[in-house]
Image (cartoon, rainbow, N blue to C red):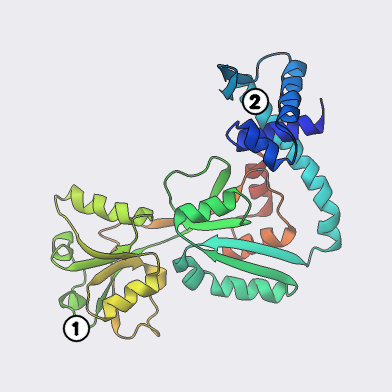
Amino acid sequence: MRLRQLQLFSQAVDCGLNISLTARRAHTSQPSVSRHLQSLEKQIGTPIFVRSKRKISGLTSTGREVLDYARRVLHDIDTIGELGKNSEASQQGSITIAASHTYARYALPDVIRTFMARYPKVRLVLRQGDPQQIMTWASNGDADLAICAEAEDRPKDLVFFSCNQHERIILAPRNHPLAKVRKPTLHQLSQYSLITYDAKFAIYWRILEVFEAKGLSPNIVLTATDVDVMKTYVRSGLGIAVVASLAYSKAEDTTLVAISANHLFEPVAIKIGLRKGAFLRSFVYDFIEIFAPALRREKIQLALAAK
């Protein structure tokens, strides 16, 4: 059994078992890919592919098990290759973080400041997007880690770690009728124009579910991916907003009032997403620990290596 067979097998699965696409990405020919896969299956001695009209349409249960072992082998080989780099230049390199605007703007500045002081030679790249974009970047290797709230349709090759949680608040102009209401009801909220996160964010659907459970319909007039945009329109009098509590600064948002929404909406967990089998430089583990002290290196490594 050859390493090249395992590499092409893993790549073929990543390409949806499209042999033509696998060949292009592996910079080889289609017949060569087919030969390697056939040879691998022959050496294993039992079918690893489900075939339909001479085409590969899936993996057998054995094939899925072989894939797990193959990826662990490839990961270990990559790790061996990176060990030298990691010991020789552990203070240099780059780290790419994928996060929503809310976390990039409000949750990460102090973390990044601490990290940059500790690793002045490490270049930090911050990519902002919606939850699906964030997870895609982490899944395909365009980001070392993803920071996001709970999300639907998580890629199977990502492992998520809970870090902490934040509550929801209602932002309103200081002269708004709700500004003096300590615990507004859902019925009261439904009487006003509402601004919140785009439908790509799980919180949008959580809000709808809470209202629908009470037989109410929120009057959502604007959705956005940028919480600062939401706050701008609240200041202009367009409506009130339901946002993450960490997005409010008493010092900066002097024209707004933050009203607790604990009694209306459940807290949302912030999670870090990492790609299974990925090799992480030491400073990536340090960044994670600065952001979430409870996430120790050993715990992360065990989860990433788990079958």
Which marked residue is nearer to the observer: mark 1 or mark 2?
2
Residue 130 or residue 121, whichever sits in front = 130
The amino acid pointed to by label 1 is Asn
The amino acid pointed to by label 2 is Glu
Residue to which mark 2 is pinned? 65
Point 20% across, 54% down: residue: 211
Classify mark 1: helix, strand or loop: loop
Quarter of the N terminus within the rendering = top right
77 lies above or below 9: below
Residue 129 or residue 17, whichever sits in front = 17
The quarter of the picture where residue 41 lies is top right
- Which percent across, then down, holds residue 56? 59, 23
Point 35% across, 82% down: residue: 253
Tag 1–tag 2 contact (CB < 8 Å): no
Q: In the rendering, which numbered label is found on residue 133? A: none
Position of 91 with respect to 48 (left or right) is right
- Of callouts 1 and 2, the N-terminal one: 2
Number of marks drawn: 2
For the question of whether residue 194 can be seen, the reply is yes
Residue to which mark 1 is pinned? 175
Residue found farthest to the top: 45
26 lies above or below 286: above
124 lies above or below 63: below
- Which percent across, then down, holds residue 222? 27, 66
Classify mark 2: helix, strand or loop: helix
The quarter of the picture where residue 177 lies is bottom left
- Which percent across, then down, holds residue 9? 69, 31
